[in-house]
Image: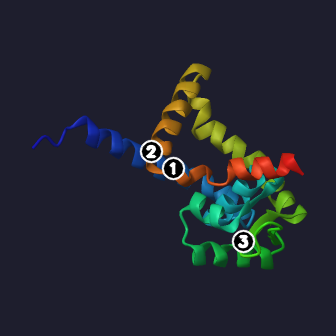
Amino acid sequence: MDFDDPRLTAIGLLAEAHTGLMSRLQPALDLAGLPGIDFETVIRLARSPGQRLRMSDLAAQTELSTSGVTRVVDRLEREGLVTRQACASDRRASYAALTEAGRARLESVLPQHLNDIEEWFTGLLDAEELETFLGTLRKIRDVVRPCATAGAQEAEAATHGS
């Protein structure tokens, strides 16, 4: 058995980089009152067409269970950061949508968050390295988390179709 296998090195480096990055990025998010899954939820909504996603797509993108995403959206709704919207074409479905307050909360934290990302991640790579790295990450993501962009195309069509 070869414990110096480059596959073990690759996954170990990825895990170490992820853990290190999250520890560097999290303090600014915590100060803004957007820890962990709360930030992931509101930033996914903000970056989605119409700043909304079907609840089922949001669950798929975040890898939360349906009940897990319901609890997160309930909490964010109580804070006024998101709201639920009924789906006009399917009464069984609903959307989570970013509110003005949610957008304002994100806007308050994004300058520091982007500075942190630049300092601890993207700023360490030149433009060509970053482009290659992003392509590599997408290639891996598309295999291991194919639902990471669930609903994006449908939401885009609905936004532009209305």
- SS at circle 3: loop
**Image coords of residue 38 (percent x, y):** 67, 66
Q: Which mark is residue 122?
A: none
Q: What amino acid type should be assigned to the residue bearing mark 1?
A: Pro
Mark 1 and mark 2 residues within 8 Å of each other at the beta carbon: yes
Q: Classify residue 116 by image quadrant.
A: top right
Residue, x 54% and y 31% (percent of image)?
135
- Looking at the rendered image, the quarter that the N terminus falls into is top left
Residue, x 27% and y 39% (percent of image)?
7
Mark 3, mark 2: which one is toward the viewer? 3
Is the residue marked by circle 3 packed among few (<14), some (14-19), or many (20+) residues within 10 Å?
Answer: few
Q: What amino acid type should be assigned to the residue bearing mark 3?
A: Ala
Q: Which mark is residue 93?
A: 3
For the residue pair 31 and 17, the one nearer the viewer reads as: 17
- SS at circle 2: helix
The disc, 3 or 1, on the residue closer to the chain's N-terminal end is 3
Q: Which mark is residue 146?
A: 1
Residue where numbered disc 2 is placed: 143
